[in-house]
Every structure is written in structure tokens, then in C-alpha cells.
Amino acid sequence: MPLSEHADQLGPELFRAIERKGYAELTAVQRAVLDPMLAGRDLRITSQTGSGKTLAIGLSLRELVNREAPASQRVASPRALVVAPTRELAHQVEQELTWLYAELGIRLATTTGGASYRDEHRALARRPAVIVGTPGRLLDHLQRGSIDPSQVSTVVLDEADRMLDLGFREDLEQLFERVPEARTTHLVSATFPRMVRAFADRLQREPAHVQGTRLGAANADIDHVIHVVAPEQRFDALVNILLANPSDQTLVFVRTRADAAHIANELVVAGFAASALSGEMEQAARNRALAAFKHGGLRVLVATDVAARGIDVQGVTRVIHGELPTNPDAYTHRAGRTGRAGRKGTSALLVAPIGVVRAARLLRGLGIDHRMEPIPTAREILDADDERLFAELTTKDAAEVLDPEQAAADSAALERWAPLAARLTGAGELERTVGRLLALARRSVTAPREVRVFAQRPVEGRARERGGREARGPNDARARREERNAAASNDARQHEHTRATAYERTRGTPTSASAAPADARARKARHPREQSQTTVAADGGYTSFHVSWGERGGADARRLLAMLCRRGQIRGRDVGAIRVESNYSLVQVSNDVVPEFARAASRPDPREPEIVIRLDRAQSAVDLAEKRQKLRALPHRADKRAPRGRAPAAPRRDDGHRPPKRHARKARGR
């Protein structure tokens, strides 16, 4: 239905604002809130992410904002409060309502945590009709008296489900105690779990359900893909996906703020225009990152679920889930960041082999059709990149048809470089010259990674048998066996890579050492949790590093090994001796990987910024090798069996004396 059909319901001012913004028609949820039968009623607005719920909020308030406010009020006396869970979402709502109400002369203000109180007081002094804010800051202004709630006629809770998940229930309850009871309350969300419905029943009176799309439905314009990835190669898989789709604007979801900062930093080191978005960032930095991402200055944005609730970027073409979401609603909100406003998008899940069944069950529960696809290999990425570069260099007329401005810029560039190109062509060795130019052009682009390719088998659905028990298909059983075997192999490799002999921690010195061969030690290796706090490698060629993490901080050999491999980008077999002291640890790293390890481990890690890894000057690899030689030089029990009736001679101590003899018991009987 064209936009002109709703001109009477919208009014001339709103109609012109929406038409000027470029809307040809309204979405289903936007048309639904224009129903005259809903005037004055509490609303529960549900629609899929990216379907225009923010504009629907503004349309639902169209009658309210036209009323005149009392002129005697000296403080802000808004007629509507819009509550959002995050700063980004609050600013997004404020920007959307600003252009919508521009011709009506309606003032708006935003109050969010982390913002300057002085700037907010200035905005509130202009007596806005609508205030958008986060729960804590809105309640703070109400308690301080800088907002008079007596004129509030409508309260809107945007992303109500997320506000309860974040623990804002108490703030919301106090906020509703301060606003008039004779008000309308609107709740807006893509999903309405049971907890949200129970909370809404306490706030609303006979609410009307406005449903733009099926509750909890995922966007039909999104292609859902599962990539099976080895857990230790998640970052390599992410790099290959980004290289295989160089024109995509990508949003990467992670679970914690530390993960967001760490992955964004690694992507920048790899040459990508990337940034993190998390709650620990200053508001100015968050605004800059969002603005750069929205205008194309950033290609990759790494965010948590909370921070990404306010991201409304129409150009996001790919969403990558670094880890499986915690629940179906979280996946709906994540995937909804792409495929917006009728555009196509891709939602890719990086899943370990052990999590494939769970991921497939999650998507089936949402009614989503998905497909399995392997991670692009390094060879495939390089071949595609060569073809793309060849097409860009040899295409003549296509650029003029697709983008005349770009064609004009290319023409100007050709005129600029034509004389130098002629000189290079006449200098001879044309192939070598072109090869050098291509190498220079691709110098700043990171090389694709070698990733393990898993067999892509479809995950069979689960059928329910009698008694309510779930029956697994043969593929599921085979997958479980392979997962168990893979886990067992990983454990065995970890034991083998440790290559350590247990030392008893008696006054910090070893009391005994094993002289068994390496294969025997590997067979007798205990579980990592049962290993002693100190291990020693069997061979030399190592350099010692000092780690500012000791036993008091919870360090042990197993946790140190995992941390060293992650931060230093090495494997377990590259680590030798691990010695854990009370406040620090000493570890040995193979000389073959020392330069790369030192460079990678020297970068601060957001997960543990207090842990510093540096070269140990007091205890070098040479010292450890000398100590090993001393241990090997100690006298041991004679290998040959002593003559019958005579005990083997006890080895002499360092002072030259033999230890006291132990008298054997006298035999009983004859």
C-alpha cells in the first residue's frame, strides 16, 4: 500500500517528514499502530528486528505530542517518556523521532548513563515534550527533581525483554511509582518471553496486541549458514570469511566485553578496519565507532549482545556469531541486525563439531531453514582474489554503467599515472614489473589462514518416540562417537605435549626425578588436573620467560599452558618446563618459536591485563640445561643385579660418606 494512502491518518506534517525521508510505503507494524481503534489504549507492539518498530513508536505518540504543555513549568515536564536498555538504542530512538517531529516543532532530549549531567540539564531546560533515556539515568533525574513527571501521559518501554535481562526491573518499578497512574503504557519488543508478559500484566490495562510479524520470527531476507570450525581456529575462520567477502560490512557478536576488545585488536593487527563496541567504552568513543561503522569507515564491528541492541545500520550485510547465543530470542535479535529494510543479509554461526546438533536444534526451533557450509580455504580465497583483481584491472565499460562517478575518478587516475606506466612498459621485464605492483597493492592485506575443513553432513531432525524420549538418527550417533574420539585425542595430545615429569613441591626443590624414556612418561602421564604444580621438560633448546601470575592468583600448570598457547599463539608442544611460585611463574618456550611468542605475548590482553609475560633474565635456558646435566650426573642405583646374599653398595653422598646402613630383619624359622 503506497504511503499516500495514509496521508489522512498521519497528518500533513508527519506525511511530509516521512516522504522526505524516502519512504515509499509503511511496514506492517507501522500501518498497524495507525488504527484509530487503538487510540488511548495500552499497546504491546511485536515485530521482527529491522521492521521499523522505532518509527512505529513515534507514530503511536502522534496525537500526544500535539498537545500544549503548561507554560508555568520551569523544569522539564515531558508528555512522554521512552525508556531504552542501552545508550545506543536511546540515541537511535531520539534521532528517529527528531526528524519525524521536525515540522511539528516538538523538542526531544536524551538522558543516558555516562553522559555529562551539565549537557543533559541544558537539554532539559528547553522543556522537551519527549525524553528518551536509559532506566537508571531517567530515575536519577526524577529523584533529583530535574524532570517533573506530573504531565507524563505515556511511557514506552523499548526492547522490554532486554531491560529485564539486564536487571533493570527495580529501576523500572521505581520509575513507574513516580509517574501518574492515569497513563498509557506501551511495550515494544521483537520477543515477549513469559517473564516480560508477567511484568507487562502489572503495568498495562487491557492491552491491545499490535503484531507486525509473527512473534519471535526471524527475517526472511536473511541467509542462515552454519560453519563447523575447530575451537582453536575460530579467529582464523573469521579472517577467512572476511577475506572471502571483502565488500561486506560485518557485525561480529561475542559473549563478553573482553572478547570484543581482544578480537577487535587482533583484527586491526591483521589489517582490517575494525573496532569494538562494549559497555566499558566511553560514550564519545562508542559514538565515534558507531558513526564510522554507519558511514563505511569501519568494515568490522565486534560487539556484545547488549551493546548491539542500538545498532541500526542499513548496510550490514553479514552477521557472524563467534559463539552460539544463549537462547533463541538472543539469536533473533542478533540476526536481525542484517537484512534490514528489504535488503539481503547473511547470518553465519561459527560452531565447534560438538555444538552442531545444538545449533541446528536452535534454528529449527525458530522455524529457520539453514545450510551447512565449509570455511573458505586459503587457496579458494587467493584464487577468487586474483579473479576479482583481474576483472577490476581489465574491465572497460562496466564501471561507467554501474558507477559513473567512480568511472570519472578512474579516468582521472589513469591520466595521472599514464606517463609512469609508459616508462615502466618501455623499461622491459614487464611481467616482473606488474608482479611487483601487484605485490605492493596486496602488501597491507593479511594472508588467508589454513583452516581444517570438516565433512559437511546434514544434521537429521529428532523424532519423539513413545514415552517422550528422543530418538537420535545414525548420523547423530556417529557424530557423538567422533566428538568423543576427538576429545580423547585432544587430551592425549595435551598430555604428550606437556612432556613433563612430576616434581614434589618440598621447599621448592625436587626430591626425585624420573629417568624413564619419553614414551613411558607419556603412557604414565596423569590427568592435567592431577599434575604437580611444577613440570620439567625432557629435552633442551628452550628460553625461559617470567609470567606475573602465581599460585596465589590461581595459576597452575594446566591453566598456564592454556594461557600461554592463546596469548603467544603457539602449541602445547612448544612449552617446556612450567614452574609455579607463589606470586609468579617461570615457563620455558622452545627456541624455534621464541621470536613469534615474545612478539605476540608482549601485547596486553584485555582478558587479563594484569598478567605480564617477559623474558626472564635471571634464569636462562642455559642455566636450566646445566641443572639438567647435574641431575643426570647424580649417581643412581646400579643397573646390574648384585650377587646373591650381598646388598648393592649405596651411592656416596656429596660429602663423601655413605648413608647409614639399614639392617634387614632376621628371617624367621630355621
Image (cartoon, rainbow, N blue to C red):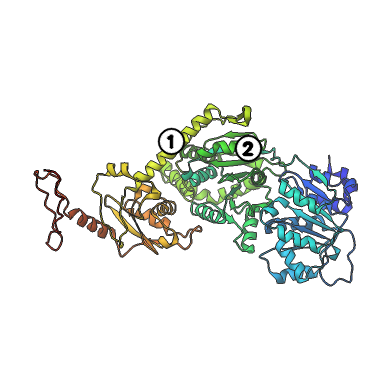
Residue 106 vertical position relative to residue 34 in the rendered view, above or below: below
From this viewpoint, which residue is outermost toward the front? 669
Q: Position of residue 219 (x, y in %)?
A: 69, 40
Confirm whether residue 571 shows in the render: no
Amino acid type indicated by mark 2 = Leu
Residue 241 lies left or right of residue 67; in this view the side is left
- Tell me which label, 1 or 2, sits earlier in the chain: 2
User: SS at mark 1?
Assistant: helix
User: SS at mark 2?
Assistant: helix
Residue 472 vertical position relative to residue 54 in the rendered view, above or below: above
How many badges with numbers are in the image?
Answer: 2
Q: Position of residue 358 (x, y in %)?
A: 57, 38
Q: Mark 1 and mark 2: span between their CA atoms? A: 27 Å
Name the mark on residue 446: none
Q: Position of residue 152 (x, y in %)?
A: 84, 61
- Residue at x 62% of width, y 40% of height: 346
Q: Position of residue 312 (x, y in %)?
A: 69, 51
Residue at the disc numbered 2: 363
Could you say which is closer to the camera, residue 139 or residue 316? 139
Confirm whether residue 552 shows in the render: yes
Q: Quadrant of the N terminus?
A: top right
Q: Residues within 10 Å of mark 1 (few under 14, many from 20)?
A: few
Amino acid type indicated by mark 1 = Asn
Residue at the disc numbered 1: 485
Q: Nearer the viewer, mark 1 or mark 2?
A: 1
Residue 139 vertical position relative to residue 423 in the rendered view, above or below: below
Could you say which is closer to the camera, residue 545 or residue 251? 545
